[in-house]
Amino acid sequence: MRKKIGILWVLLIAAFVFMSGGCGGGSSDFAGGSGTSDDPWQITTPVQLANVKKDLDAHFVLTGDIDLAAENWAPIGDFVPASDNPGDETPDMELAFTGVFDGGGRTISNVTIDNSAGAAIGLFGCVAGDGVVSNLTVKDADVKGGALVAAVVGYGAGKAVENVHLVGDNRIEGGGLTEGTARGMVGGIVGGGFCDIIDCSAEAEIILDVSSEGVVGVLAGGMEDSDIIGCSAKGTVTVTGNNNFGIGGLVGSAQESDTVQNCTSDVVMKITGNGNDLIGGLAGFAGKEGDSEYTLISECEAKASITMTGSDNKRIGGIVGGGFYVNMYSTYFPKPCAIQIKDCETSGSIAGGSYVGSIIGYAYNNSTVTNCTSTAMSGPSNQIGSSDPNDLSNF
């Protein structure tokens, strides 16, 4: 059962979403196929790619490279909450993409979206239910949105994103949305959500320009109940706002996730605002609630240059900032979530901030670091910045 943080997920954003819907595709809309798993719709042109919006629960395969340079792309699948509950992150399945999209090893280039007041922004806006996006390369994306922003999948609430690669010159920017709590959640491949991310890589410039509760990473932003396996990230993360938490080189968060395994990051992270928290070369924060369960971060390597020029930035680690805990949400999370970090390696540097460790910024007594190497990380004097329970009052 998913344990919702609340602060990460979307409130009152339906007004910002363009509702395309789906009415069923036909043979004239695609290059071939019938939309079944055995005979997926075939896509070779930008028009055919846009026609995916007509049959959101079908099977598709890309059979040729596509250049969207002439397009102001409207995302495939929308996120509209399924109920009027203001905290509901469950998508209306009739409006989300719930099918299977196989990129066939092909490339979609020049995805361009400029919608700073929009939510669930990407090549796919919202992938939900049994939805899968796989075997795809996206190249040279320029995407700007408000919340849940990525080059590939804005809101990933489906099964998985697998073997998807973001290459070339990519710029992903989020934070323009002024209503709702999920005002950031920015990543190269997935902006935020619940899907597993497997064997994916991202190379991108990621920009978060918002104050309060932004979550950001080069591969993915705010992920919950999502395993991250065999993934890599390379690029830059720039955060200019204040009071954000969950700033990571690979992912902003891996909350309630079972594992982050065999992943790497090679990033430059610049945080210029004040009061930002839970910052890590691999993940901003992770962990599971309670003492008997934990998120396992294992066999990962982070090469990160993390620089903070503002004041009161804290819980910074070469691998992870810490387990999720913020005083203002202590009613829901009375202590930091549990993490075990094993067989990981860090290099690079951390400059500025407090509660700084070469592996983890703050480790509560339900979190451990085992067999990790950090001799090539300059700045922190210890692998664990602090483990003193009395420090909780400072967070």
Image (spheres, grey):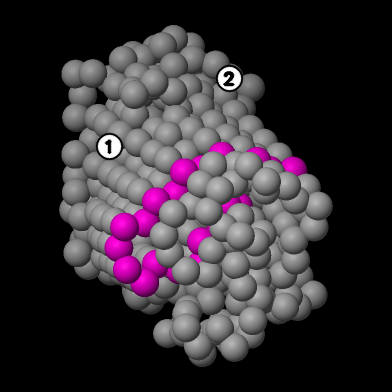
* Left or right: 185, with 303 as reference point: left
Q: Nearer the viewer, residue 117 or 89?
A: 117
Secondary-structure class at tag 2? loop
The amino acid type, in three-letter code, at marker 2 is: Asp
Image height of 282 relative to 23, above or below? below
The amino acid type, in three-letter code, at marker 1 is: Val
Determine which quarter of the picture holds residue 71: top left
> Which disc, if any, is residue 143?
1
Counting residues from the N terminus, which is met first, the one under dot 2 or under dot 1?
A: 2
Badge 2 is on which residue? Answer: 39
* Rendered residue at 44%/49% (across/down): 306
User: Any magenta on residue 66?
Assistant: no
Determine which quarter of the picture holds residue 336: bottom right
Magenta range: 299-319
The location of residue 328, given as percent across then percent down, is 42, 85
User: Any magenta on residue 311?
Assistant: yes
> Which disc, if any, is residue 53?
none
* Rendered residue at 47%/39% (across/down): 267
The location of residue 384, given as percent across then percent down, is 65, 65
Secondary-structure class at tag 1? strand
Res. 24 visible in picture: no
